[in-house]
Image: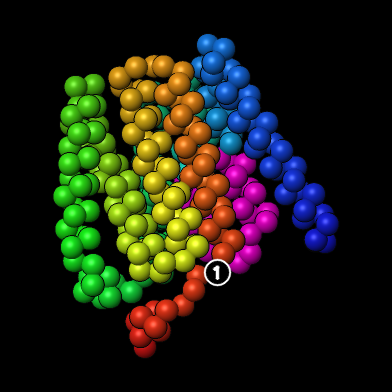
Amino acid sequence: MSIKTTKVKTMVLISLITLAYILFVVFQFSGKAVVAESFSSIIFPLIAVLYYQSVTPKTLFFCLFLISYSLSELIFFVVDYVPYLYFYFTGNILSLLSYAFLIVEVCKLLCAMHVLKNFKIHIVVLIGLNTYIAFILQEAIGPYLDLTLECLVEITYNVVMLLLLSVALLGYIYKDDKKSLFFFFGALCIVFGEVINVAYLYVSHQNLFNFLSVSLFVLAFYFLYQQAKLKPIETKDDDISKM
């Protein structure tokens, strides 16, 4: 495939992503939430296609992240054909897996011994902060959950999401390069997007909440896409860990 053809396909995909986002915003604030949701659900699979089209070399766990998250979005189109609990558990488990794959992607760039030895205070603070945030989130959504299994899924989901942010932050402190910074920004946008999505789903169905949530996820995917194009910078600790 020629470079020119690749650039044309990339521009077409970027145009489709932009169009889908604009249509999402238009329909969201026009009071047509279902139509808006259908457009937001195709944004992220399109970003996944853009990654496969334009980024080389590709990494396994980032690919798995994109596939899992895209599937979690695309199941919106079968919501009317399956029982709600199937839709709920499938969507959440796919999203949870996608975040787990991202965590593995970050951990590949870290020297675990160096992090555990030199970032003890950081880790303790992050554990305390994550526990508090997870408790607040569970308190907010707990009254709306009927099944014990739903509570378990939500707790696991929040723990994995916050673990992603913590690992991304430690990765940035450890590597201190542009790639790890973009990864951290991406994880940060994901967490803020998830928190606002909780407010939209369980507190108040305001158009602004959904707009902010989807916009943060789009921004997160932008940062993650940008970091995927960068090569990791090797450090002395990385070399030692490979010996």
Majority secondary structure of magenta residues: helix
- Residue 183 image point, x, y percent: 45, 56
- Residue 94 image point, x, y percent: 41, 43
Classify residue 78 as left or right of residue 52. left
Q: Quadrant of the N terminus?
A: bottom right
Q: Which residues are magenta?
A: 44-68
- Residue 41 image point, x, y percent: 54, 32
- Residue 61 image point, x, y percent: 46, 60
- Picture residue at 22% right of the left edge, 53% below the top: 126
Colour mode of the rendering: rainbow
Please tell me whether residue 75 is drawn above or below residue 183 in the rendered image. above
* Quarter occupied by residue 6: bottom right
Task: Name the residue type under label 1.
Answer: Lys
**Residue highlighted by disc 1:** 231
Please tell me whether residue 24 is drawn above or below residue 129 in the rendered image. above
Classify residue 124 as left or right of residue 47. left
- Picture residue at 40% right of the left edge, 69% below the top: 175
Please tell me whether residue 116 is drawn above or below residue 140 in the rendered image. below
Check the image and name the residue furthest to the bottom: 243
Q: Specify whether residue 56 is painted magenta.
A: yes
Q: Specify whether residue 98 is painted magenta.
A: no
* Quarter occupied by residue 150: top left
- Picture residue at 60% right of the left edge, 31% below the top: 21
